[in-house]
Image: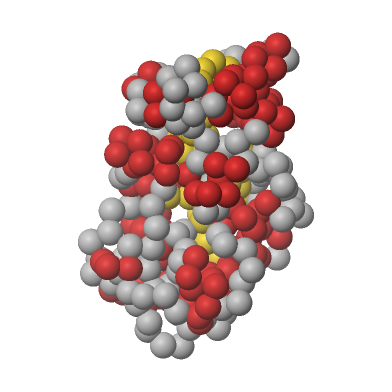
Amino acid sequence: MSRLARVGITLGDPGGIGPEIVLKALAQGGSLPPAEYILYGSARVLDREAKALGLSPDIRARAAKPSDEPGLFLEDIGPGPEGDVRGRPDAVNGAASFRAFETAVAQARAGHLEAVITGPISKTSWSLAGVKARGHTEYLETFYPEAIMCFWSSALRVALFSHHIPLREALGRVRKDGLEAFLRRLDQALRKLEPGRFELLVAGLNPHAGEGGLMGKEEEIEVEPAIRAARAAGVPAAGPFPPDTVFRQVLGRPDRVAVALYHDQGLIAFKLAAFETGVNLTLGLPFVRTSPAHGTAFDIAGRGTADPRSMLEAIRLAAR
């Protein structure tokens, strides 16, 4: 009998909807793959949220050794925030959410977890708490510099060449050698994810993919040569395609992944197509990492109205 997967789940920012959507998703236990689900966060915050939602989850304290039985377990990253700051960035909440994530990642790196699912955090709260990393992916990149941020759904799949950096800096990174290396890494990572080969459709940088140089030379000088070199190395890449149409060629095609050259180029299309059910997936790690494709939603925190579907899909994808 094979051992159950050990899946870590961080609660995210205590002042956002993270604890709520985690509990709501886990309440649908019958629809989740059997696993040892280990929650990382404050017991006090978890208890507060469960009472507010009218839920009574069977969550046990995590034992020193794996349980080898399905269920919910808590690694209390206490003591947690004593106040009840919700709906806005807060240094104490930022420190708590980072501590939970840091602990889960350390255990995954040590081989004690096969997957880490992260509740949404506030980058501003992390900054207020003195955390140097801008977010989850940036922290992971300190250990795994070649990590790749992807967004996954049944409707659309997108990989980002660059992510949480200023647009001016992102445009400056579009260079042949870097893009070719990225396409090679992405192809290798995708081969491990699901059977078969994914075709990579690369977006252009300029309107109309440069229109033959009339609207910019980056496609001719940097993007096209990178794609040709990657194809010569066996990577099934094509493009560059006009950024306003490439996502239509990927929509509903599970064998294709759109490659966006900067954050919003890919995320505007993805969140329009799959905001409620999309998953943020980090490739290039020795363990699985997923998260909902949305943020802390401070505007509805504490109301009990948050939609847990993206978290539910993040758990399902990681466990699968």
Out of 202 and 319, give the one closest to the viewer. Answer: 202
Which corner quadrant of the image does residue 26 belong to?
Answer: bottom left
The residue shown at (23%, 69%) is 303
* Viewer-nearest residue: 172 or 129: 172
Residue 280 percent coordinates (x, y): 48, 44
Left or right: where 132 falls relative to 88: right
Residue 22 in the image: x percent, y percent? 41, 58
Q: Using the rendered view, name the quadrant where residue 271 is placed.
A: top left
> Colour scheme of this structure image?
secondary structure
Outermost residue on the right side: it is: 110
Q: How many numbered circles does the render carry?
A: 0
> Which quarter of the image is occupied by the N terminus?
top right
Residue at point 60% right, 77% down? Answer: 130
Q: Please report the residue visible at 49 percent of the width from the left and 21 percent of the height from the top.
A: 213
Q: In this view, does 288 lie to the left or right of 32?
A: right
Query: From the viewer's perspective, is residue 84 above or below residue 211?
Result: below
Q: Residue at coordinates 64% horizontally, 68% vertically from top-left? A: 132
Compared with 186, 95 (above or below) is: below
**Do we see residue 243 in this rendering?**
no
Image: 102 above or below 251: below
Q: Which of 58 and 117 is in front in this view?
A: 117
Extreme residue in the front direction: 214
Q: Where is residue 212 in the image (x, y as percent from the top left)?
A: 47, 17
Q: Is 189 on the left or on the right of 203, as rendered?
A: right
Q: Nearer the viewer, residue 95 or 263?
A: 263
Q: Can residue 52 be seen in this view?
A: yes
Residue 162 in the image, given as x and y percentages of width and height: 57, 43
